[in-house]
Structure formats: C-alpha cells, structure tokens
Amino acid sequence: MTQKLILDLDTGIDDALAISYALGSPEVDLIGIVGTYGNVLLQQGIRNDLAITDLLGHPEVKVYQGLPHALKKDSFEVQPVSAFIHGQNGIGETVIPDSDREPENESGIDFIIDAVKTYGKDVVYVPTGPQTNLAAAIRKAPEIIGQIGKVVLMGGALTVPGNVSAWAEANISQDPDAADEVFRSGIPATMVGLDVTLQTLLTRKETEQWRQLGNAAGRFLADMTDFYIKAYETTAPGLGGCGLHDPLAVGVAIDPTLVATLPINMQTDVEGATRGRTIGDPDKLNDPRKTMQVAVGVDAPRFLSEFMTRITNVARSAKAE
Ligand code: RIB
Ligand code: CA
C-alpha cells in the first residue's frame, strides 16, 4: 500500500521545500500537515502551509493545528535569527495569495492518533520542527508507539556541533523535553540531523531552473530559496549553499537508502549546560533492541538529483502563469 505521509512543519523555507518534495513523490500519499511553531508562530506556519499547497496545485492537502509552544512553556516568541534566515513571514518575504481554506477542526494531536489507528504501519510521520506535537500524541495515546510505521525526524546533531549552541540543533532546542520523551519512548525513529543535512546543499544555479519555468510556482520557489541562500552566506560563510534540512527528512522517509544509519538508543539532555544535546542513552547502551537510527552519512549527489527532479515536476505542473 502507498505510504501515508504526515508532515509536522514550522513553515519555514526548508519546510516549504519539504512540502514540495512530498507533493512530487508518487510513492507517498500526503494525508495531512500538522502545524507547529519554530521558524514562525503556529498561525503563520499554518497560513503558509495552506497558501503553498494551493499555489502548488494541491488544495486537497488538509492542514491541522498543532500546539503553539513547548510542553513546559506557556508561550513562544520567534527568535530574531529565525526571522533573518526565513524572513518575517517564514517564506523569505515572498508574497503569495492567502488560501480561502481554513485549517481542519480536528486538533493536530487527535489527527495523528486517528491516522495511526486507521493506517497503522503505513503511516510515516515526518516532523521538521520541534517534537512537541508528537510527544503530546504519545502522552495521549501511548499505544501508537507500537502501531505507527515509522518517524523520520529532522533535528539534532550526533557527530557534529549544533547550530544554535555548541550542542543543540534548532528544532530540538525549541523543546528538548518533548524530544527526550519521543526519543526514550521506543517509537521507531530515524534522526536526520545536521550530521547529514549540512552535506546536502543547494545553490542559485539550481533555483534559477525553477525561475526559468516561467510560472508563479517556479518564481515563488526560486525567490524564497534565494532568500535562504543569502542568509546562509552570512550565517555559514564558506558552506557553499543552503542546507536542505527538511526535504532530506522527507527524502529519507521515502527512500531510506539515501543515508547510512547508526542503530542507537538516543536521549536528549534536558538539564544543565548541554540542554538540547542529542546523544546516546547510556542506560540503553547495552540493550540489544535499538529503537532509533541516526543518519551519519548521505548520498548527497543522488539526493540532490531526486530533489531537483521532484520539485521541478511539481512546480511545472502547477498553474502556468
Ligand atoms: O536546524 C534546522 C531546522 O531548523 C530546520 O527544520 C529549519 O526549518 C529550522 O526549523
Ligand atoms: Ca523546519
């Protein structure tokens, strides 16, 4: 059966590219997007999800509201660095029409649980923001741990430093407590972190191909991603492009052979100076059952080729104007 894909996004430029990658992938059926906070506020991310799926010619994709802040907090504010990298509106200050659709009435948490009850092992869940929604779903219905197909998450760093501190990657640092709950829960999960996402880079040479399509979708993708590339020139000079964090997680969900993985039981540090660090759980080091895999190597040329083919196809098929 076709895999049932759920994205959990803080949309976000690379989250927008993750949507595009998913829509260009006939192997999966995108059954819903759950909104989260991070690059933008929850409501802005949901606005972007609805507008982007419309623009790309997929108004059938349902969008659900997740939680607006970390489990142990009562509010969330966008960090200035997020606005610098993704723009105030999350999509590089590009202007695209608002959707006339609304998010679904069912909560994102209940949607996750219902989807797992309905489709079981066919569900692949891809969070590319904080782990808050997934942790909340596990708290509410812990039986989904053994019922879901798999989780492929973008976040963390095992063999390289973090990107918001020496230890912490941005998505994990938004809610380390939620990440720790997910990691220790035993849910089958692959961590696609900075170890591999900073090896998959896009440049203006590729974005120009989208602009040359000559339609609104192509211009949107090119202008938005050029904003992101420009930000990377300041935040990571010398890297030679922008990191394709979130689309790589979707790519790995569809084709796990894109990465080499290390089987390991993980935890997230929640106390002290290393809060937000993703690392092996010493208490489960000798447990022969490994519930997590961490991507430590990537076939970057093959992923980039898949990325360009799939997203260019989606943009080309969108309305010609
Ligand atoms: O660290 C990279 C991650 O942080 C990506 O998911 C990006 O969208 C931001 O949320
Ligand atoms: Ca993201």
Image (cartoon, rainbow, N blue to C red):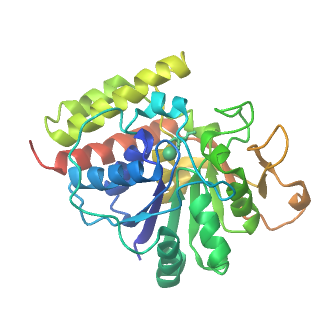
Going by the image, does 231 lie left or right of 191?
Answer: left
Q: Is residue 60 above or below residue 229?
A: below
**Is 112 or 266 nearer to us in this picture?**
112
Q: Quadrant of residue 206?
A: top left
The picture places residue 48, in percent across and down from the top left corner, at 34, 49
Asked whether residue 201 appears in the rendered view, the answer is no
Q: Position of residue 295 (x, y in %)?
A: 64, 47
Instruction: Give residue 205's position: percent from left, percent from top.
Output: 32, 24
- Judged from this view, the residue extending furthest toward the left is 321
Identity of the residue furthest to the bottom in this view: 118
Q: Nearer the viewer, residue 194 or 8?
A: 8
Q: Is 60 in front, or is 139?
A: 139
If the image is split into quadrants, where does the N terminus sit?
bottom left
Residue 250: image x %, image y %?
47, 53
Image quadrant assignment for residue 132: bottom right
| 302 versus 43 height, above or below | above
On-image quarter of the C terminus: top left
Which residue is drawn at the image coordinates 43% and 42% (left, top)?
12
**Which residue does the image show at 23% across and 50% down from the upper left?**
98
Q: Does residue 152 lie above or below 228 as drawn?
A: below
Q: Is residue 214 visible?
A: yes
**Residue drawn at x 66%, y 81% as measured from the top left:** 143
The answer to whether residue 210 is left or right of residue 249 is left
